[in-house]
Image (cartoon, grey):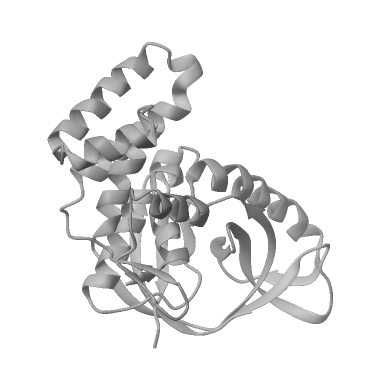
Amino acid sequence: MFAIGDFARHGRVSVRMLRHYDAIGLLRPAHVDDATGYRNYDAAQLAELNRIVALKDLGFTLEQVRTMLADEISLVEVRAMLSLRRAELESAVAESAARLTQVESRLRSIELGDEVPAVVLKELPATRFVELSSTAGSFTPDDIGPVIQPLCAELGRRLPEATGVRPSGRLTCYYEASGDEVIAHAAVPAVVDSDAELNGLTVVDLPATRAATLVHRGRIDEVLPAWQALARWVDDNGHRSGGPARELYLDCPDDPADWVTELQEPLMP
C-alpha cells in the first residue's frame, strides 16, 4: 500500500489531483483510515491512473474519461487512440513536440508494462551532500523538468567557486512531497571543511539506507515507466518506501537518449 504522497510521486500527478479524482468518483483509494482520513492506494492502481492520464492527454474531459473507464475499454483500444493522437501531433510537430514526447512515453509504458525489471537491492551509505533546492507544483514531468534542470545548472556554476568543498561523487537528484507541492533537490556528494565558504549551497546529510535500485537507459523525461516498474517491484516483494527517492546520474553524454541513470527507492527497515 502507498500513502497518497508516495502514490502521487510514482504516478507523476499532484496530491491535489488525486483528491479530486477521489471526490468525483474517478479513482477511489484502496483504503481510507477511519480515524485519520488518510488515503492509501494499491500498486495495481497505477495502471488505472495511467489510463486516466493517457485519456486526459488525448483531450477528453474527466466526465468522458469516467464514462470510457466504466465501459472497460481495453488496453488495445487505448493504445490505438494514443497512436491516432501521435499521428495528429506529427502533422504539427513544431508546436506540439512536447505533447508528442508524452504520448510516446505512454505508449512505451503500455508496451513494457509486463516486463520484469532488473531490480537490485543495495546498501546506500550515509552521505553528505552539498545542494540547491526549489519547489515544483507536482511530480509530473512538465512541473519537475523546468525546476530541476536549471537547479542542476546553477549547482554546476556555484560549486567551483565554493571553497573548502571537494566533490566526492556524481550528481544526484531527489524529491520530497510537501503538502500539495514537491521539493526538488539537486545535490553532489562532497567533503566539506569546517570553515568552508559554501557560495549559497546547503549541506545535507542523508542517512544510510537499504534501497531497491533500477538502471534506466535513455532520456530522463521518459523515466516514468522505469519508476513505476520499480514501485511495482517494491510492493510485490512486501517492501515499503522509506525516504525520498533518488536519481543518480551515472553517465550523461551529449545525446540525452544515451544517458544512464540509477533509480534508487529507499526502503523501510
- Of all residues, the one furthest to the bottom in this rendering is 269
Query: To which quarter of the image does residue 135 belong?
Result: bottom right
Measured from the top left, where is residue 161 in percent x and y?
81, 59
Position of residue 111 relative to residue 134, above or below, is above
Residue 220 visible from this viewpoint: yes
Of 74 and 135, the residue lying toward us = 74
| Picture quarter with the C terminus | bottom left
Left or right placement of residue 232 versus residue 99 in this view: left
Position of residue 14 relative to residue 177, above or below, is above
| Residue at the spot 39% in from the left edge and 76% down from the top edge | 33
Left or right placement of residue 202 versus residue 135 in this view: right
Measured from the top left, where is residue 198 in percent x and y?
81, 68
| Residue at the spot 45% in from the left edge and 83% down from the top edge | 209
Position of residue 181 relative to residue 87, above or below, is below
Residue 104 visible from this viewpoint: no
Query: To which quarter of the image does residue 44 belong?
Result: bottom left
Left or right placement of residue 84 versus residue 143 in this view: left
| Residue at the spot 31% in from the left edge and 46% down from the top edge | 50
| Picture quarter with the N terminus | bottom left
Left or right placement of residue 138 versus residue 81 in this view: right
Q: How many marks?
A: 0
Of 199 and 139, the residue lying toward us = 139
